[in-house]
Image (tube, grey):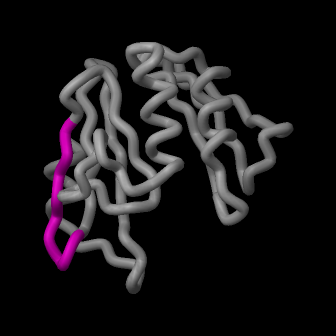
Amino acid sequence: GALALLRGYNYQLGELPVHFLIADSSGAAAIVEYVGGEIKVTRNAGPYLVATNFTVDGSGAPTNAPCNRYRTAYSALSQREGRLSMLEAMDTLAAVRQDITMWSAVYGLRNGQVRLVLGGNFANVHAFAHAW
């Protein structure tokens, strides 16, 4: 699957950390990070997983995450046991956005719905659907 595919690449963007959060309709999720030229994988232990722009591997996350944005998103998910509506999930992303946020996306992994915001413009949410 996706993890096997990513293991075939060493994706770097200069000094910035690179993270991919991947998930499937079964609820399995993983954060894939490129750290020191190696791939590090963090799998979800519960019904959700959070990634923001810091390296999760070895960070102490989720209990000691060094990122306020991460803690905000994690708190929103933990309060609802990982069950947020598309609107609630988008509201959470709006709460943690930065001025440099390029995109925010919410994926309905079971129903194929996608909600996408570009450039932090949460007044303009693009909606897509995939027919399985």
Indicate left or right for 55 with 16 as reference. Answer: left
Furthest-bottom residue in view?
14
* 109 or 129, nearer to the observer: 109
Dominant secondary structure of the residues highlighted in magenta in the image: strand
Residue ID at (39%, 40%): 50
Image x and y of residue 100, in percent: 67, 65
Query: Residue 77, relative to residue 123: is it above or below?
Result: above
Image x and y of residue 40, in percent: 16, 59
Which quadrant of the figure has residue 5?
A: bottom left
Furthest-front residue in view?
64
Residue ID at (76%, 35%): 125
Q: Where does the magenta region start and end?
A: 35-43
Which image quadrant: the C terminus?
top left
Which image quadrant: the N terminus?
top left
Q: How many marks?
A: 0
Indicate left or right for 58 with 54 as reference. Answer: left
Image x and y of residue 89, in percent: 58, 27
Which quadrant of the figure has residue 53?
A: bottom left
Residue ID at (40%, 85%): 14
Image x and y of residue 62, in percent: 30, 41
Query: Residue 68, relative to residue 43: is it above or below?
Result: below
The answer to if 17 sits in the magenta stretch is: no
* 71 or 5, nearer to the observer: 71
Residue ID at (29%, 40%): 63
Query: Residue 95, relative to residue 57: is it above or below?
Result: above
